[in-house]
Image: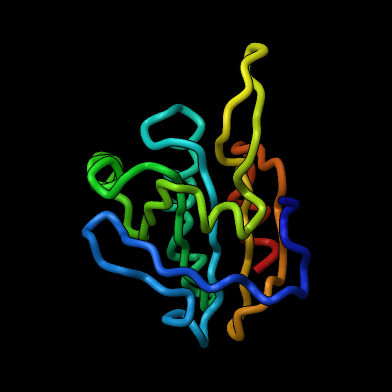
């Protein structure tokens, strides 16, 4: 499935965070959401991306926005990852890739000639009413958080 387009209604979700608490997109009505999809906890690129978002969280909050990370990892993995990096934002578990697929951030990938299903590093800025304001596809970690801040 292709990534969603700017101006589209963001698909609803109900996913568990690192503490087992269910989060729904509707809970964030009235503020912007930076929803970023990443492949795997505790990998170099994903660690750098999480650290960058955490470092800029104060500036993101000043723009009436919150950050939510989504990956196929389970709640236990997210808990360890979050604690290790001292993250101050939510990580959501999407182990079956259903929500990631709805956002066009999950599908077939190829690495070293091997095909597998996984996350496409993608970030969405969702506005206060639940509409996709900005889409970042094929995200390169270096400088991505700065691009998100500019878009907010």
The residue drawn where x is 50% and y is 49% is: 97
The residue drawn where x is 40% and y is 46% is: 95
Picture layout, residue 133 above or below residue 27: above
Picture layout, residue 17 above or below residue 152: above
Which sits in the foreground, 54 or 108?
Answer: 108
Measured as percent of width and height from the top left, residue 21 is found at: 25, 67
79 relative position to 38: left or right: left
Which sits in the foreground, 70 or 52?
Answer: 70
Measured as percent of width and height from the top left, residue 74 is found at: 31, 45
136 relative position to 93: left or right: right
Measured as percent of width and height from the top left, residue 14 is found at: 41, 69
The residue drawn where x is 43% and y is 28% is: 43
The residue drawn where x is 65% and y is 30% is: 109
Image quadrant for the C terminus?
bottom right
Picture layout, residue 33 above or below residue 138: below
57 relative position to 76: left or right: right
61 relative position to 15: left or right: right
Q: How is the image coloured?
A: rainbow
Measured as percent of width and height from the top left, residue 28 is found at: 46, 79
The image quadrant that residue 92 belongs to is bottom left
Which sits in the foreground, 84 or 61?
Answer: 84
């Amino acid at each position: 499935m292709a990534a969603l387009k700017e101006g589209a209604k963001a698909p609803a979700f109900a996913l568990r965070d690192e503490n087992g608490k269910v989060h729904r997109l509707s809970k964030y009505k009235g503020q912007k959401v930076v929803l970023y999809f990443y492949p795997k906890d505790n990998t170099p690129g994903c660690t750098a991306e999480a650290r960058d978002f955490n470092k800029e969280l104060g500036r993101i909050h000043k723009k009436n926005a919150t950050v939510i990370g989504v990956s196929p990892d389970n709640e236990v993995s997210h808990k360890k990852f979050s604690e290790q990096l001292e993250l101050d934002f939510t990580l959501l578990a999407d182990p079956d890739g259903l929500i990631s697929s709805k956002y066009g951030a999950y599908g077939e990938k190829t690495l070293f000639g091997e095909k597998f299903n996984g996350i496409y590093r993608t970030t969405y800025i969702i506005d206060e009413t639940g509409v996709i304001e900005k889409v970042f596809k094929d995200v390169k970690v270096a400088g991505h958080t700065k691009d998100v801040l500019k878009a907010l």
